[in-house]
Image (tube, grey):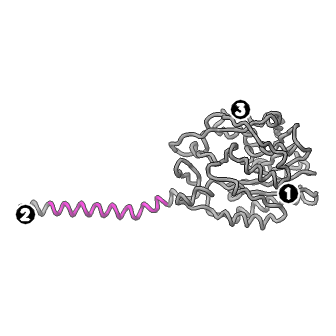
């Protein structure tokens, strides 16, 4: 009987030792696993919203972006009496990362740094025009039907707010599987791709410089592509111009931009006969003179923090 009790005690001790060893292993390896899941570039889910971490703030990247913008200014814009503005679009992590327990870049420092470097432009603040719900749950981009406040703020700065449409009809283009769902193995419901319509927008045409195509503002063919966000202005394109024969002015606007602008630019057409979008991720800055003449236009530099913090893609 004593041997039996002794054996049971020994077994209990062995089990306890095994449990303790397992706990120690978790203590050693689990923090590393958690840190890996929080590395910059990792996709995470908070609530019903997915995002990709992008931190810390890369000052060298901001410096490079500012130098690229300075090149554009010096070679195409300086000395022509143009009104030049810049604005920064916060990525979704501004609203989501830190409150979900993840690291985020210093967005205040980013803006202050750029204001100092781009002191020859007028800064337009739009962070306070946005909230988390203004972005797709499964993608990095903002939702066109939610960014009217941004368009109005920019319109006020540019002096054309009185010409911008006050009312739109909101329609659905179907379901939208964003980039975070496509990149990861996330079990999420897709977003809905909604867009805004007005008689003025329906009469606009979009000219694509590199291939000579003319398309409507909304490109239904792009809904067949993997990235349906290309529905707005046919997606990535180095240089395009939206022409509005019903504009309230004869003014022209040039926007140096990234993909966020594809859904925003249509909301500014009321104030401009022509809006030209230039994406220097896909065309070299020193080649712009082949396609464009800069004279008597308003100029807006509008970039997301995602591009500014990873500016090696700017050419």
Residue placed at 84% from the left, 53% from the top?
A: 158
Marks 3 and 2: which is nearer the front?
3
Residue 298's disc is: none
The quadrant of the rendering that contains the N terminus is bottom left
Q: Is residue 28 magenta?
A: yes
Residue placed at 65% from the left, 39% from the top?
A: 227
Q: Which residue corresponds to mark 2?
A: 2
Marks 2 and 1: which is nearer the front?
1
Q: Which residue corresponds to mark 3?
A: 220
Measured in 3D between alpha carbons, the distance from the residue under mark 3 to the one under mark 2, in whole angstroms, is: 83 Å
Q: From which residue to which does the magenta span run?
A: 8-34
Q: Disc 2 vs disc 1: Cβ atoms closer than 8 Å?
A: no
Q: Residue 208 at x, y = what percent?
A: 82, 39
- Label 3 CA crowd tier, 10 Å (few <14, some 14–19, many 20+): some
Q: Secondary structure at mark 1?
A: strand
In the picture provided, is 79 more to the left or to the right than 199?
A: right
- Label 2 CA crowd tier, 10 Å (few <14, some 14–19, many 20+): few
Give whichever of discs 2 and 1 has the lower sequence position: 2
Instruction: From this view, report whether residue 142 is shown above or below residue 15.
Output: above
Q: Residue 29 at x, y = what percent?
A: 42, 61
Residue 315 appearing in the image: no
Residue placed at 78% from the left, 58% from the top?
A: 124
Measured in 3D between alpha carbons, the distance from the residue under mark 2 to the one under mark 1, in whole angstroms, is: 91 Å
Q: Secondary structure at mark 2?
A: helix
Give whichever of discs 3 and 2 has the lower sequence position: 2
Q: Residue 18 at x, y = what percent?
A: 28, 61
Q: Which residue corresponds to mark 1?
A: 84
Q: Nearer the viewer, residue 282 or 101?
A: 101
């Amino acid at each position: 009987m004593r041997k039996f009790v002794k054996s049971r005690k020994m077994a209990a001790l062995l089990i306890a030792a095994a449990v303790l060893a397992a706990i120690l292993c978790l203590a050693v390896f689990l923090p590393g696993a958690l840190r890996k899941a929080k590395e910059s570039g990792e996709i995470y889910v908070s609530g019903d919203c997915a995002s990709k971490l992008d931190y810390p703030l890369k000052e060298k990247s901001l410096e490079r972006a500012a130098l690229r913008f300075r090149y554009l200014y010096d070679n195409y814009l300086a000395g022509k009496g143009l009104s030049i503005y810049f604005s920064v679009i916060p990525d979704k992590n501004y609203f989501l990362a830190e409150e979900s327990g993840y690291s985020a870049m210093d967005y205040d420092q980013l803006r202050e740094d750029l204001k100092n470097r781009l002191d020859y432009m007028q800064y337009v603040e739009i962070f306070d025009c946005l909230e988390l719900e203004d972005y797709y749950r499964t993608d990095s981009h903002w939702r066109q039907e939610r960014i009217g406040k941004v368009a109005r703020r920019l319109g006020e700065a540019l002096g054309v707010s009185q010409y911008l449409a006050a009312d739109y009809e909101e329609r659905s283009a179907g379901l939208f599987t964003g980039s975070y769902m496509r990149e990861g193995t996330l079990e999420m419901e897709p977003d809905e791709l909604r867009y805004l319509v007005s008689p003025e927008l329906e009469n606009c045409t979009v000219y694509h410089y590199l291939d000579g195509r003319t398309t409507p503002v909304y490109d239904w063919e792009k809904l067949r592509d993997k990235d349906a966000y290309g529905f707005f202005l046919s997606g990535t394109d180095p240089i395009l111009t939206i022409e509005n024969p019903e504009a309230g002015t004869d003014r022209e606007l040039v926007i140096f931009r990234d993909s966020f602008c594809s859904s925003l630019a249509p909301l500014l057409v009321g104030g401009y006969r022509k809006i030209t979008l230039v994406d220097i991720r896909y065309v070299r800055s020193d080649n712009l003179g082949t396609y464009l003449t800069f004279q008597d236009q308003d100029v807006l530099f509008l970039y997301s923090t995602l591009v500014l913090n990873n500016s090696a893609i700017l050419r």
